[in-house]
Amino acid sequence: MKTMTIRNIPDGVATFLSGRAAREGRSVNATTVSLLVKAAGLEPSQRKRRDVSWLAGSWTPAEARRFDEAVANCRTIDEEGWK
């Protein structure tokens, strides 16, 4: 891990970081690193995925029912096609 020094932090930012650290029961350093990781898009949950897992659980029951109705004919087996 790299150690860095950041200078000229605006007072409002310093106040925000201190307040957030106190609310979360963490150090200002840990809070700052966490926010930097999130802002850089490097949180594990923000990494690009190559699947559709983000869709899981996102449909309402009505949307799921409409989808099932729309693909119902895809669920039938054409017996002639399997001979």
Image: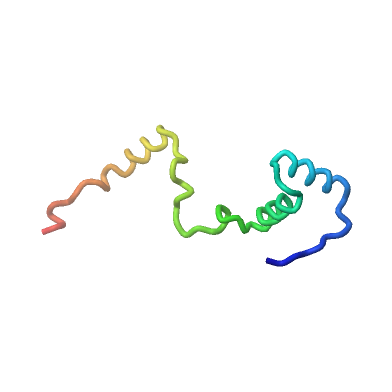
For the point 75% across and 65% down, the residue is 3
| Quadrant in which residue 62 is drawn | top left
For the point 13% across and 52% down, the residue is 79
Please, is residue 81 above or below residue 70 in the view?
A: below
Where is residue 33 shown, x and y percent of the image? 71, 55
Q: Residue 22 vs residue 15: left or right?
A: left
The number of callouts visible is: 0
The type of colouring in the image is rainbow
Where is residue 65 shown, x and y percent of the image? 36, 35
Asked whether 55 or 81 is in front, the reply is 55
Asked whether 43 or 59 is in front, the reply is 43
Q: Spot the residue most to the top.
A: 62
Q: Residue 54 vs residue 77: left or right?
A: right
Q: Spot the residue most to the bottom.
A: 2
Where is residue 6 shown, x and y percent of the image? 82, 60
For the point 25% across and 46% down, the residue is 75
| Quadrant in which residue 12 is drawn | top right
Where is residue 81 shown, x and y percent of the image? 16, 57
| Quadrant in which residue 21 is drawn | top right
For the point 44% across and 45% down, the residue is 56
Please, is residue 27 above or below residue 60 in the view?
A: below
Q: Residue 51 vs residue 15: left or right?
A: left
Quadrant of the image containing the C terminus: bottom left
Please, is residue 26 above or below residue 47 in the view?
A: above
Quadrant of the image containing the N terminus: bottom right
Q: Residue 72 vs residue 59: left or right?
A: left
Asked whether 56 or 34 is in front, the reply is 34
